[in-house]
Amino acid sequence: MAQSWVPFEWIVAIRFLREGRLQTWFILTGVAIGVGVIVFMSALLAGLQSNFIARVLSAQAHIQLLPPREVTRPLRPAQDATQVVSSIIQPPLQRLKSIDQWPSVVSQIHAMPDVQVVSPVVTGSALAVRGSASRAISVTGVEPDDYFNIVKLPEKIVHGRARLTGQDMLIGLELASDLGVDVGDKLRLTNAVGVETTLTVSGVFDLGNKGANQRSTYVPLRVAQSLLGLPGGVTSIEVTVRDVYAAEVIAQRISAATGVEADSWIKTGAQFFAAVSAQTMANTAIRFFVGLSVAFGIASVLVVSVVQKSREIGILRAMGITRGQVLRVFLLQGGLMGLGGAVLGCLVGALGLVLWQKLALNADGTPLFPLVLDPQLFAVALGLATLTGLAAAYAPALRAARLNPVEAIRG
Amino acid sequence: MAEPVVQLRGVRKAFNVGTGIETEVLHGIDLALNRGDFCAVMGPSGSGKSTLLNIIGLLDRPTSGSLVLAGQETTTLGDQELTRLRGHHIGFVFQYHHLITAFTALENVMMPMLGAKGFADAAMRERAEGLLDSVGLMPWKNNLASNMSGGQQQRVALARALAMNPALLLADEPTGNLDSKSADAVFALLRRFNREQGTTVLLVTHNAEMARLCDKTIQVVDGRIQT
């Protein structure tokens, strides 16, 4: 007790905790388990979610600009707008249509902040024919320099190269085997009205999805334009942005600036987002209840401690120790239990995460997904656990402070 | 004559006030203790001795009457002021020594000073060592309170009661739980502090022989002082 900078309340609180050795260790362990679970789960979930999002976004743009859809309006005579000539309305056909003035739209988007890559795309369907075999395919015409920054096709190539010049085409693994072609072979593509073109397979890719591998093909933009009857046009403009979570805001800004409909991945992937937010909610609920049980644990230990120490509290009061000082002694004990348990819990949680990363591996020995040990997570865990301890200690501390010294000393 | 250290006028104390089982244990006590008094309180069990001591020690409040301690009327004070007054002017020694078991002998003696000041300092430590020395326990100063004999613990409690240099020392059967040798030692210490420091001592005891060694004896019977 020679250190003069330690206040009276701290000295007594720490001594009381040290004296109740077993009790203190039990509650510290309890708090540590609770905090460890929260830290482990939160980091796991954050890693899982960012990994999900990274995977989802490796195969699609963050924002897609589309031409306006065609709609039907009831036919009304010019002189009387309340009268309807024809009331049976068929939904209109959605012809393949180009985005109006797309080069200027592209340069407009390019100039916007936060935008990374802008890539015009033509998509449509065609028939791939080889000998007597044919398959319906989806043709995506791209400018490889830009587009490969959005969908990392070069990483998915299994044979050949991701080259799209002249009359090159990239096809999926399943389509290649269905049609019996490989790198260097030629394929004839026919559109619905019989326009034909012959392309050379320069690469075979694997998107990790059998259906997609059967249908998807990539060709140079110009080839797709002529094959699909859209010379000089594009059917969509794909955009990536720096902050993927800001995609919806940026999409709305693009829409407002260019007048072209822009959908973000957040809007089109609403289901995915619902799943992510359901996970987050479940995690929050678990955190809340673990926190609650930690609080009750601390409170019950302190209630017992107040009963055990009531005689000593009475003596302290007889010595001139104020109610406020007694209150603070017990509040501090709660806070220290929370903080101490959380320090241990953070260690346990971090250890668990390191082990998880070592043990939960892909077949090739790489971690299932990268985990990030976010210092902020630990700081928040320590802070919240301390506050929880203080809050839990309040009722017992108040009880200690209100003890009648005469009765407490008599015992 | 100088102002009394403590003065009680018409102090009554009733328990369970306002209920059907209201019982008055003190019926109008008048008492004055002067500086340097060494006074024994005797009386049968249940006569109200301990209640009187608790009221004088500001641990309990009288139901009516006046209590002046160190020149200050205490019955109108709030808990905060009473606690401060108690800490600075009154030392307690109880029958069951009541040390704080998580602390050493020295730290127990420092405790009242520490509580009043908020932080430990060297002067505090020196004073506590001096007090422990005067009760002959310097060699045990770093013993945990729980590792000492009853007589030793009571001497630590006595040193602790004197830590704030109180004007009034209240001892509730301080030797009631000790063998005669330890009891004599504790009583001798009380007597010595009374003579050397002029500390007013009020000693509740059942021991008539011990009471005879005091300067004055008060008999409490059925909540009244008999002279």
Image (cartoon, coloured by chain):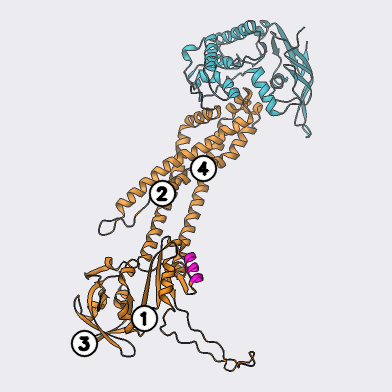
Chain colours: A orange, B cyan
Residue A410 appears in the picture as rendered:
yes
Q: Earlier in the sequence, mark 3 or mark 4?
A: 3
Q: Which residues are magenta?
A: A247-257
Q: Which residue is mark 2?
A: A374
Q: Nearer the viewer, mark 3 or mark 4?
A: 3
On the same chain: label 1 and label 4? yes
Q: Earlier in the sequence, mark 3 or mark 1?
A: 3
- The percent coordinates of residue A345 (x first, y second) are 42, 43
Quarter of the figure with the N terminus of chain B: top right
Q: Earlier in the sequence, mark 4 or mark 2?
A: 4
Q: Which residue is mark 1?
A: A232
10 Å crowding of disc 3: few (<14), some (14-19), many (20+):
few
On the same chain: label 4 and label 2? yes
User: CA–CA distance between discs 3 and 2?
Assistant: 58 Å
On the same chain: label 3 and label 2? yes
Check the residue under mark 2 and report the chain it is in: A
Q: Which residue is mark 4?
A: A297
As helix, strand or loop, the secondary structure at mark 2 comes to loop
- In the picture, measured across the screen, residue B21 lies left or right of residue A198, that is right
User: CA–CA distance between discs 4 and 2?
Assistant: 27 Å
Q: Which amino acid type is marked by label 1?
A: Gly
Q: Quick check: is A253 in the magenta stretch?
A: yes
Asked whether the beta carbons under mark 3 and mark 4 sit within 8 Å of each other, the answer is no
10 Å crowding of disc 2: few (<14), some (14-19), many (20+):
few
Q: Which amino acid type is marked by label 2?
A: Asp
User: CA–CA distance between discs 1 and 4?
Assistant: 71 Å
